[in-house]
Amino acid sequence: MRPANVKVLGAFGALLFGAVAALAGNAPQAVLPQGSDAAIAKEVRHEIALYPHYTIFDDIKFQVNQGRVALEGAVTQPYKKSELGKIVAAVPGVTSVVNDLKVLPLSSMDDRLRMQVARAIYRDPSLSTLAFQALPPIHIIVENGHVTLEGVVNNSMQKQIAGMRANSAGLSFGMVTNNLRVENPSPKKG
């Protein structure tokens, strides 16, 4: 082969490689169609999980309907409500945000109760491994001395133990409301 042909083939190969690399870089990463409610929900969930001030003492739920996002739940500080609304509004495909997050009362007694319940739950040997997750799955919502557990646990035994530990933590006005959902319910016998 002549040197001129090698140069042309080399240039063509580099051009072809560059085009393939550019196309691969622009390839959509998700299988979901961009702008679909499922794609928006996935991105909103991701943004909420990455929010640095989201703790086990907050509970954030949302719904997506034709690009409109409705935020629900409770947060411990007013700035969290406004920041989360702005973060969700910036997600591609979101057309509007209804921010119905409730700001829990600022109370040192509620703060103390939150810590007592968290210690009681996450120090239990059967639940302690859950505490090592980036955002532990049991959320402790305290409002004027009333405790509600939100989130998802692996099985009904964990749900029951979390409720018992929260009830035994003290300082709560009445029984703890256990709204924990079970991810792997035990099969029905029969």
Image (tube, rainbow, N blue to C red):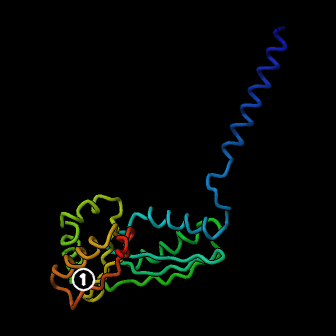
Question: Residue 137: x and y, percent?
Answer: 35, 68
List the residue tagged with mark 1.
Answer: 110
Question: Does residue 35 appear to the left or right of 132 in the view shown?
Answer: right
Q: In the displayed structure, would residue 27 be above or below residue 130?
A: above
* Viewer-proximal residue among 53 and 9: 9
Q: Residue furthest top?
A: 2
Residue type (three-letter) at the residue carrying disc 1:
Asp
Question: Residue 135: x and y, percent?
Answer: 35, 63
Q: Residue furthest bottom?
A: 174
Question: Residue 128: x and y, percent?
Answer: 23, 62
Q: Residue at x 84, y 12 (%)?
A: 4
Image quarter (top left, top right, bottom left or bottom right) of the N terminus: top right
* Viewer-proximal residue among 90 and 39: 39
Q: Count the marks: how many?
A: 1
Element type at marker 1? helix
Question: Does residue 176 appear to the left or right of 53 in the view shown?
Answer: left
* Viewer-proximal residue among 38 and 93: 38
Image quarter (top left, top right, bottom left or bottom right) of the C terminus: bottom left
Q: Residue at x 19, y 82 (%)?
A: 167
Q: Residue at x 72, y 31 (%)?
A: 17
Q: Residue at x 51, y 81 (%)?
A: 99
Q: Quadrant of residue 163?
A: bottom left
Q: In the displayed structure, would residue 64 be above or below residue 48?
A: below
* Viewer-proximal residue among 120 and 15: 120
Question: Residue 25: x and y, percent?
Answer: 66, 44
